[in-house]
Image (spheres, rainbow, N blue to C red):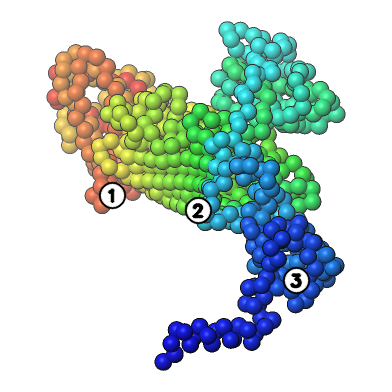
Amino acid sequence: MISRRTLFRLTSMATAALGGSALAKAAQAQPAAVTDLAGLADLPAPDDAAPIHIPGQGWFEPADPSGGEPDGITRIAGADGRHWRRSGYGGRLDPAWFRQPQDGTDDAPALQRALDHPKPADAVVVALGSRHYRCLSRLTIDPTRCAVEGHGAVLDFSDMPQPPDLPPALTLADLPRGQGWQHQDGSFSREEGPGEALTHQLSLPEPGRYRFELLITELSGRIDYPALYLIVTDADGTELGGTVAVSPGHFDFEIESPQGPATLSIQTDCALRLTRFDVTPQHRREAVLIQAGEDSAQYGHLWLSGVTLRGPGADTTLHGMRFETLAEARSSRLAMRDVTVEGFHTGLILSHRAYLIHATGLHCACETGLHFLGGAWDAGEMISLYASTIEAARIALRNNGGEFALFGTSIDFVDQVLVGTGQLGLQACHLETNRPKAADKPLFDLGHGTITIDSGSFQIGGNEFELGNQCDHIFLLRSRLATARMQDVAIYNLLSQSGALAGGPGRLDIARIRGNRPRHMAPIVQFAPERNLLGPLPLDLRSSDSPTGAMRQFSLAQTRVTVPPEHRHLWVVGTAVPGAELGLSFRIRSDAAGVVWLTAQALDGETRLGIGDSWPVEVGPDWTAVMRNTGGPHPLAPLDGRMPQGFAEVALVLDLTGVTGPVKIDDVFLCAS
């Protein structure tokens, strides 16, 4: 056995014998005077020189000058014409290498130097590790120049100065009269009819960014698709931004104002009412700007991963990330993996040339989750989230015309899921929202475009659950160009004050919806005359002496039916839709208190088949609103609330034997879903 003393002696002899080995060189490596890169540059770099260690910078080794140009970071020119090359660089930059004494406690300057260091198309990784970085200024990332990787790294913008909120440079009151427009009762409006564009010279205080925000409370006309066209141009007629509105609602867009004057143009042939119009100067508010430049590669966009962006928290005006590229034929595409954005006003703002952005494992906890700006150029194509979370937001998605696709994503404890226009697809997602507390704040507020919810789950919870949802609708579809579809979704508590799942002239289609009884969904899909299975007036009313007796024509009625005491079984008959669940709504009253039993039935001549449950309704001298649907039974139960095949008609059946005297029925609505 070799003793420790013998082993130590043999090791010492081997080290001495190696002479020029790396271990021996490292042991004698660094002259005491070399403490920074400037000192390294003064050293000759002969072939047999030992690696040099610089505190905070790592190791450098001699290199042939033909291997590349000195860049002051990864390759240093030595005193004898040869180079020192950073050892272990491997295409990964450490921000610590870029720190300078004047940076103080602010890590943003060193980070920005690291982000700017790679040449275009170098595809270098800026390695953040698991460190905490205090950032007092914005960071700009060229998505084609470098990837940014962390392993739990935090970019903390909590102490970043917030720009002041400036008053609007233009408001509703500043818009001029003319071309049928007038100011009245705090609004700016016009009646329907042809007219030239109304133009107004904008008096913008200085060049910079301006946000236009408008609220349209009325937009109607006899043409198929009423619309408002609002455009801002410079002195040469170049369009700086704008929006097209085809429905009431909130719209916004931003422009970069020119050095010279700008002109606002407003045009419509429709009846229109504006109740808000603000043009407000905007400072740069984003913590991280994703932006390609003129010299950036057209393709080869990289990634951001393993990083948390932390903002100041409540009441901040800062935004987390902004995707915006002004250079033509370039874009702000980026892949995000396991990125958290928290404590900002808006998590992600998507502007000019922001498209084909996809995020896996994104966690966004901000007042507004994602906001696609109106007026963005060449932008909005397929912004995708996978296995991500948007939570604790006032609005999860504000969309002005973009395409959002969410897969296996959870939207938790938000006040509204979507506000705006465009396309939104939710595949196998989980929606768990706060209890709506305002009539005009539906969970989905769509001006035009399409919402598709396929599989997954959708429920409303939140504090003071027992007070109920105060919204008039779950889906507000503001124009004929707005469509929402929901199928194969497990739902709970989608109840509204109106009793309808959707409102507005758009269309909602649902299929195969299931939930926990009894509070699982609004019983009526959408109040729209063309969707009433009872068809055009007059109503088809039939009566019988018993629930199973022969039916006979009762009477014809427009909207209100008075059923005399001698008729105690009434059928209100409409057209069958095989395979559909049924929603029903009507009002009922009687002089004497009692109980009426309701049933939906499929009819084929005298053959009758009950669909779903029977419901008792207490009636009296005051009108009682009744709303039910047949989607409650378990899917495996016989006749699980769906209209069976082979039946030509469907009917709302009222058993009035529990009430004495005449009964009045009004506003009967029966729909398929």
The front one of 592 and 278 is: 278
653 vs 613, nearest the viewer: 613
Report if the CB atoms under discs 3 and 1 are less than 8 Å apart. Answer: no
Q: Earlier in the sequence, mark 3 or mark 1?
A: 3
Name the spot of residue 348 as percent of width and height, x first: 57, 41
Residue at x 75% of width, y 71% of height? 62
Dot 3 corresponds to which residue?
Answer: 62
> Mark 1 — residue?
635
> How would you rate the neighbour count of disc 2 (Cα within 10 Å): few for under 14, some for 14-19, many for 20 or more?
some
Q: Report the disc number at residue 152.
A: 2
**Number of numbered tags placed on the structure image:** 3
562 or 156, which lies in front?
A: 156
- Please rate how many residues cluster around mark 1, counting C-alpha atoms within 10 Å: few if below 14, some from 14 to 19, many from 20: some
> Is label 1 in a helix, a strand or a loop?
loop
Task: Please state the horizontal and vertical placement of residue 584, each as a whole percent of the image.
Answer: 32, 31
The residue located at (66%, 25%) in the rendering is 212
Nearest the camera: 131 or 190? 131
